Image (cartoon, helix red, strand yellow):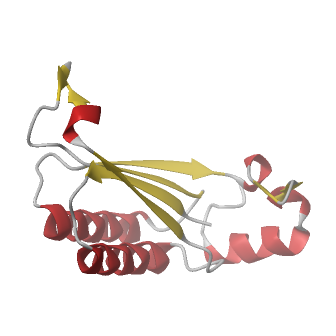
Amino acid sequence: MPVAYLDVPAGADLDTKRDLVKDLYAALHEVYPFPDDTRIFLREWPLGSMSQNGNLGSEPARPVFIMHVPRGGDPDAKRKMLKKVSEAVTNAYQLPAFITFMHEHSLDVVAVEGNLLADDQRRVEDQRNAYPAAGE
């Protein structure tokens, strides 16, 4: 279920982006292997569309990674994942002050094709087994 958005300045070449999303997927998949449906959206912004501290087009741009992930997971594994995510983005963009936001969601606030995941008892059990504390 992980869905992530990386906001960065425009300019990385296609091979760099391919390597980046592979590294991001690998880092997320270590903590959130179930289900294997990880989506990563790269959102590139020209400098004239980015503001930092009220300054339009200020450089160097500071990337932001926002993840929507299942509730639960091992805290130490999350720490390792966050280091790997930071390294992958730094390798791709060499930008300072990288920030990540993790939004954890329980199954009663996520729907797939209009159906709450909490209504699928098999999914509830599978997630409870895959992520400690996910069944809250």
Q: Residue at x 23, y 28 (%)?
A: 51
Q: Where is residue 42 in the image (x, y as percent from the top left)?
A: 40, 59
Q: Can residue 67 be seen in this view?
A: yes
Q: Which residue is drawn at 11% across and 49% down?
A: 96
Give the vertical position of 14 relative to 6 (above or below).
below
Image position of 50 (left or right of 120): left
In this rendered view, identify the residue nearer to me: 105 or 8: 8
Q: In which quarter of the image is residue 121?
A: bottom right
Q: In which quarter of the image is residue 12?
A: bottom left
Q: Which residue is drawn at 74% across and 52% down?
A: 110
Q: Position of residue 61 (x, y in %)?
A: 16, 43
Q: Where is residue 119 in the image (x, y as percent from the top left)?
A: 90, 59
Furthest toward the top, the residue is 54
Image position of 85 (left or right of 74): left
The count of marks equals 0
Q: Is residue 50 visible?
A: no
In this rendered view, identify the residue nearer to me: 75 or 50: 50
Q: Position of residue 26 (x, y in %)?
A: 40, 81
In this rendered view, identify the residue nearer to me: 77 or 47: 47
Give the vertical position of 17 relative to 19 (above or below).
above
For the N terminus, the image quarter is bottom right
Q: Residue at x 56, y 64 (%)?
A: 2
